[in-house]
Amino acid sequence: MSRKYLLSALAVATLVAVSACGSPAGSGTSDQPTALAPSAAALLPANIKSAGAVRIGASYQTAPMTMLLNDGQDKSGISHELATLAVEQLGLKGEFTTMPFPGQAAALEADKIDAVWETTSINAERLKSATFVEFAKLTYGVLVPRGNPANITDLKSFCGLRIGVPQGSIFQDYVESASSDCKAAGSAPVNVLTYKGPPEGRLAVLSKNADAFLGGYANNLYYAEHSDKGAVFSAVEVPDIKATPIGIQFKKGNTELAKAMAEAVNALIADGSYKKVFKKYGLEAMEINSASIVQ
């Protein structure tokens, strides 16, 4: 064996040995993202750190907050984009699951997901069984046939009309309260129609089975502008419903993950990423100055 060949062989053997020391057998190469906000990542509970991922559920039916594009192949929307960015801040992978609104709280309770992130209003009833991180604020409005033929302007104008709402939502509470006010004033009550989710409510308005569908104004405005180039629906803001906070929903008492996520969102606010997402959709009015835990 020549001296040149022997030196080459020794060099290769040394490189293999060094590589073996750097990557113990069976360990493989980690593809876990690096936390962009280490101080936020430090707050994560042990089980999430161990899993290396956070499981997030959403209906993907509340555009522009959550929606499916390209024939349902791609998840998108304000909430989804913020969730993706926040997970990156924590150095985690995001596992996003599509699930209808009525089943989300039960999925949290059963530990099938770690969080719900879409357009969930924070209210006293939900706080009995959930912990939230406020990340935006929501104003309300109705989706109506183009031109607003029922001339809806506020809650009082709901009297005698068929108003659709997502079943079990805060919107249902508002309409039922408005109906009571109508009866107390001697007017016809509201015919409250409940639907599994926004798609069914929008279809009811389109098919003239409902006079309006109440929901987030941003959601309804999006569909009014994007349905048949604006020729089908109009969106009307309901000014006498006060803007309410919306939040990332966690199982009651899961404060470690909530604190970590709040810090991740605040990191996005600080670096400008948060503002860019809302500006992209023309909904800067939904922004807040800082994310906080509500429980």
Image (cartoon, rainbow, N blue to C red):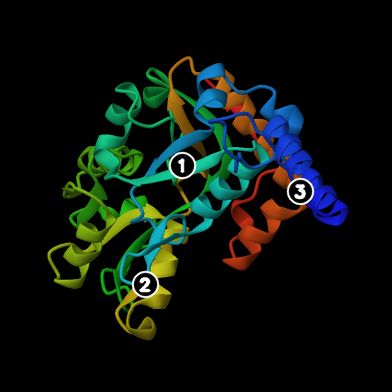
**At label 2, which amino acid type do we have?**
Asn
Closer to us: mark 1 or mark 2? 2
Left/right placement of residue 81 relative to residue 62 reads: right
Q: Quadrant of residue 92?
A: top right
Return the disc, 2 or 3, that comes first in the chain's sequence.
3
Q: Secondary structure at mark 3?
A: helix
Choose between 103 and 237: the one closer to the eye: 103
Give me the disc on residue 109: none
User: Relative to 106, does residue 241 appear above or below in the rendering?
Assistant: below
| Percent x, y of residue 145 | 27, 74
Q: Residue at x 33, y 56 (%)?
A: 61
Q: What's under tag 3, amino acid-wise? A: Ala
Mark positioned earlier in the residue sequence (1 or 2): 2
* 256, 242: nearer the viewer: 256
Inspect the image, locate mark 1, and give the three-letter code of the amino acid beneath it: Trp
Left or right position of 270 against 69: right
Label 1 packing within 10 angstroms: few (<14), some (14-19), many (20+): many
Give the answer, above or below, for where 259 lies relative to 220. above
What label sits on residue 117 in the rendered view?
1
Residue that extends furthest to the top in the rendered view of this protein: 253
The residue at which mark 2 appears reads as 70
Vertical position of residue 111 compared to residue 11: above or below: above
